[in-house]
Amino acid sequence: MVASRLLVACTAVLAATTTTSLGAQDVAWVNARILDPATRTETRGALVARDGKFVAVGTLPAGFSGTRIDLGGRFVIPGLVDAHTHAFGNMSPGGAPQMLGADGSARMVLQAGVIAFLDLFAPEDDILGLRDRQRAGEVDGAAIFAAGPCFTATNGHCSEYGVPTRLVNSPAEVEREVTALAPKRPDVLKIVYDNASYGSRRMPTVDRATLEAFLAKGRALDI
């Protein structure tokens, strides 16, 4: 149903208005243009929420007596998911780094309609600890999924940023390092297997046997 797919619908406008509006009383965002990418359709009308969940799309229920918020013909889209981030910092449009930290990034991107993101390299205890606190309901923001560290060869890509990596140069090191990380429950595992040049230099990469051992270990651990 359209209503269920739009359960997580949000835009910058919607995110800004829901933080204090949703509660026991019904809320309707009226005069909206609601997009459903699955069916490539647009519904013009209202989006109705009750107790923090969307319950109707399109026509405002008869006798509705809750709060009405006029979106003035703005679009409402399903929440966005960013599948490759490094949430500890971003480059601003002017070129200066914005070191918001993962917590600040999670809160900021939610205001832009991003409801979840996958972080693919960060200080592992920081990002996985924040994710765990978020899932326990202690912090808010866009939902965090995370790899934690980057697995790479000695002096390989990821090592140039000053963020701790996990070095794997052989299948034996894969067994040791992935086993050590597993209790922290990463959502995915990331390894660099590449021969690209970064800047003016070519960086080392793991060999095929190490890559295959890594993939096999991840499957065995169901990560």
Image (tube, helix red, strand yellow):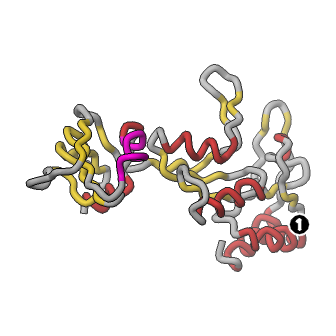
Q: Residue at x 36, y 52 (%)?
A: 22
Q: Where residue 159 appears, x then y in whole percent?
A: 85, 46
Relative vertical location of residue 104 with respect to residue 179 in this rendering, above or below = above
Along the horizontal axis of the image, is 170 left or right of 109? right
Along the horizontal axis of the image, is 177 left or right of 7? right
- Provide the major secondary structure of the magenta segment: helix
Q: Where residue 43 appears, x then y in whole percent?
A: 19, 46
Say which quarter of the image contains residue 177.
bottom right
Q: Residues within 10 Å of mark 1 (few under 14, many from 20)?
A: some
Pick the quarter of the image with the C terminus.
bottom right
Pick the quarter of the image with the N terminus.
bottom left
Along the horizontal axis of the image, is 188 left or right of 165? left
Q: How many marks?
A: 1
Q: Any magenta on residue 146?
A: no
Q: Where residue 76 appears, x then y in whole percent?
A: 31, 42
Label 1: which secondary element: loop
Three-letter amino acid code at disc 1?
Answer: Ser
Q: Residue at x 44, y 43 (%)?
A: 113
Q: Which residue is mark 1?
A: 170
Query: What residue span does the magenta drawing correspond to?
Result: 14-22
